Amino acid sequence: MKLVLKYRVLIWLLVFISCILFETYIVGDSLYDYGIIMIKYIQSYINDKPIYILILNCFSFLVNKHCLVLFIYITFNYFKFYSSFLLMVICGSIALTTGFFKLILRDPRPYFHDNDIILYDCETGYGNPSGHSIGAVSLYMTLWRVFTYDVKMTNFKRNCLKFMIFTLILITIFSRMALGAHSLNQIILGGFIGLMIYILFFNVIELDMKPEIEIYFIKNKYILLIFSFIVSFFIIAGIFIFNFFPDLNDNKSLYLNAIHKFCPGTSYSKTLEYEAYFLLSSSSFLLGAYLGIYYDLTYNFYNNENVWLAINDGIDENNIIDMNKTKKIRWNDTDFFTSFKRLVVIVVVNLITVSMNIFVSSKSHTNVIFIFKNFLPFGLTGFTLFSFTRKICLYYKLGNDVYINNQNEYKIEKNIQKKKNK
């Protein structure tokens, strides 16, 4: 018998908290020390082989924060709207959990205190859990879920894709340790948190990509309220931890010296305290994105759910508008040149909101940075991306022509009604 949602959430929380405590107080230190030995052994093998270091850096970059921003733009451009929003929630959850637990655990990176370990990539902030490991597991597994749902595949192709995803996850996680950024306990905890994020959305909450479920999850005010409350909690928690839970680590100066050794010129706000800003920006982006897609579905496109679904999911047999246009009915069904122009619009619109943070110096008071360099710019970016950006693209005929093309003679609502009357 299937458990109701509240019991699934409770079990998920118990497992999640138990494993965090188990790592923190029981096996964390021993795994960390064992990881140091493994890193030294691996680096003794790759130290004189630049090609190996380059390959490991490439795998590591696939879950880098800059790569995630690029990923946001690409998925927004090519995926249907709900799928891209779902993937953005996963990306936001990666950043949110990474920042939150690094602020709480404050576990040093291997290179902070061991001079024999080389950092082959600039990494600041504390090391536990590994954000790359969280991202590799939760993001790649979500991509596998989306692709297997949207693209028809044979069982053989589906299993091949699963094997590729699993291999990519392992190599990405391994690269973080080999490059000297994380120890064994940190990549294991990161992988576990990434798996729990995936389980939360797809096995506990059971998000689906069917059109009627999409509408339900977006417009349900109860879900919106819970989502807003959870994200707001992390925003408040991040500010509270930053201001009232000071970093009193005796080795703090030693850690800072290690950071400046491998990352010279790094401003203080981007050293050990960096995760606090990362937490706030990702939380505000998540909140803005949900409010943006809620606004989009509620107020854009004639306030008509059928129109919204038509643009995202195409037209099925019971909702035919024009069979000659079914091949260009979805948001992501465009040619390469049109997609490129649309991507330019997306980047420009987002730069307008993100550019707000250039007016605030990194040397300003920390809470000023919190609000005006992270919270407002990224919150507005998330809202704008999912509320107005696509409408701007449609207005300039960059993509789906169901909504905007020849509006005077081609009204979706009327055609749907005609079909129903027949």
Image (tube, helix red, strand yellow):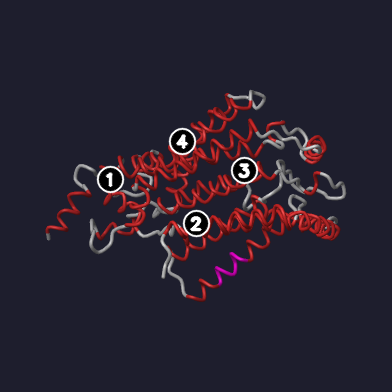
Q: Position of residue 142 (x, y in %)?
A: 51, 59
Instruction: Give the residue at mark 2.
Output: 10
Q: Residues within 10 Å of mark 4 (few under 14, many from 20)?
A: some
Q: Report the mark closest to the observer, 3 or 4.
A: 3
**What is the three-letter code of the residue carrying label 4?**
Val
Q: Is residue 273 above or below residue 96?
A: above
Of mark 2 and mark 1, the one earlier in the sequence is 2
Where is residue 61 drawn, in percent x and y? Answer: 65, 51
Separation (CA) of disc 3 from disc 4: 27 Å
Decide which of 145, 327 is in the foreground and name it: 145
Closer to the camera, 10 or 107? Answer: 10
Start-end of magenta stretch: 160-166
Gap in angstroms between the C-alphas marked 1 and 3? 44 Å
Q: Find disc 3 in the rendering and name its residue.
A: 99
Mark 2, mark 3: which one is toward the viewer? 2
Q: Is residue 161 magenta?
A: yes
Amino acid on which the number 3 mark rests in the picture: Gly
Instruction: Provide the residue designation for mark 1.
Output: 405
